[in-house]
Image: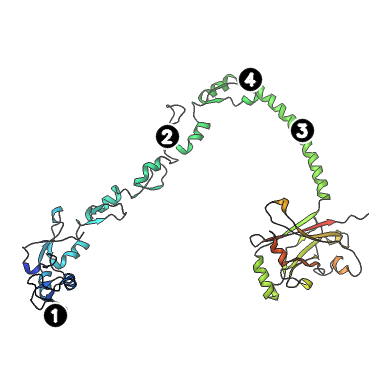
Amino acid sequence: MECRPYFVNKLKKVYICPVCNEVMTEPFLFSSCDHSSCKSCLQQLLRDRQQCPVDGINIVEEECEVDTELQQRIAKLQVQCANRNIGCVWQGTYNQFQRHLSDECKFQSIQCPHNCGERINDCSLDDHVQNHCQYRIIRCQFCENRIEARNMESHWDQCDEFPVQCPIDHECDEVPRGKLQEHIDSQCQYVIVDCPFQKDGCNYRAERGSMKKHFRKDAINHLILLKSLLDRQRDKVAQQHEIIADQCKKIMELKKSMDTSYVWRINKFSQKLDNARHSKSHSILISDPFYSHRHGYKLCALMYPNGDGNGKSTHVSIFVHLLKGEYDGVLSWPYEYKTTFELVDQSDNVSDRENISYSIIPEYTAANAKFFSRPENDANLSFGSSTFVSHKVLQDRRYIKDDTFYVKIVLQRIISH
């Protein structure tokens, strides 16, 4: 709502707009009759009847002009602040009034900056914002969290640090809500509890606060129960040692016979396939080195996402080659491990999975020596499948999930008879 000043002297009729009956704002002179009105009121007259509201003479828009003299006279009129009734003593010219309201008047009603809906005098604003506004942020005295004042009571209904009465006995001290269960379980002196030796045969039950007295009174009985417990535990430990020794033996036997496998995870496959199609330098992927077994043969897998040889542009090709390893000197040669490449179906139901596999059984001949003999250089020639899986089949099931697929490389030692 617009604030209007109090005029020190009674307003002359010449200063009042005949349309809105208020002090003129930007007065315009009607040249046809020497009357004036506000600029905005003139626009209304021209839309409605185009006649002077004082004498009814027609108004011609082109003949109306700013009444500069009247505007200057109005600007110099002496006024008092609109807030004089609540304490403001300012007096000045009409032209200075709006600047006084916006920049100086401490009694001007303004909207609370927290948007609480209240309007407050400027001189009382700081007190309202700091101490009374329901939207101000204050700290909870219990948990130190910052909460709007209007929500503090509802916050206390769920605050973990708010003190609540222990439900076991009214004589018990108040405890923070979040620690109430811990208090009941381990601290409250009025809770009925079993003797700690209950599992060992003591049937005493009483308030937690009286348990120390029970300990002193029945100390000898508790020692007897403890000795019996220790005897039983000693027998159990001996049995466990026997079981552990047996399991260790089985584990060692299992390790000797267990096949070795390496799982190669290929992520961002669509990007790598696209790179391989458009750039020769990105046509091959190389796995980390892995071993057939501890202190065994060192190998490395190679993959061509866009195929190689017969599989070029249609298949994923996969190979493996023997690397010069740290333990080659203690291994038997040539390499004699059945090597299986297995593409894992990632269907959620394991029983529905249809993995794709391709196996190679080494046959050592003079021609194959470059693949299976002990490496003389950093790596032997690679062996595998150039048509391991077609691009079409790769997309048929859940072989690719989240743009990732897995190839399991299984190495099985060939037992010669």
Task: Examine the image and state in which quarter residue 156 appears.
Answer: top left
Q: CA distance from mark 4 to mark 3?
A: 28 Å
Which of the two marks, 4 or 3, is nearer to us in this view?
Answer: 3
Please report contact status of discs 4 and 3: CB closer than 8 Å, yes or no.
no
Of the two numbered discs 4 and 3 on the same chain, state the one appearing first in sequence.
Answer: 4
Residue located at (13% from left, 76% from top): 59
Q: Amino acid at mark 1?
A: Glu
Tell me the residue that label 3 is attached to: 239
Q: Amino acid at mark 4?
A: Asn
Q: With 178 as the anchor, is 61 left or right in this view?
A: left
Q: Which mark is residue 63?
A: 1
Tell me the residue that label 2 is attached to: 164
Q: CA distance from mark 1 to mark 2?
A: 82 Å
Q: CA distance from mark 4 to mark 1?
A: 120 Å
Q: With 239 as the anchor, is 133 left or right in this view?
A: left
**Residue 413 position in % (x across, y down):** 85, 56
Category of crowding for the residue at label 2, using alpha-carbon neighbours closer than 10 angstroms: few (below 14), some (14–19), many (at least 20) = some
Circle 3 sits in a helix, a strand or a loop, which is it?
helix
Q: Amino acid at mark 3?
A: Gln
Which of the two marks, 3 or 1, is nearer to us in this view?
Answer: 1
Please report contact status of discs 2 and 4: CB closer than 8 Å, yes or no.
no
Q: Quadrant of the C terminus?
A: bottom right
Residue located at (55% from left, 26% from top): 193
Of the two numbered discs 1 and 2 on the same chain, state the one appearing first in sequence.
Answer: 1
**Residue 269 position in % (x across, y down):** 67, 65
Category of crowding for the residue at label 1, using alpha-carbon neighbours closer than 10 angstroms: few (below 14), some (14–19), many (at least 20) = few
Q: Which mark is residue 221?
A: 4
Circle 1 sits in a helix, a strand or a loop, which is it?
helix
**Front-lying residue, 332 or 300:** 300
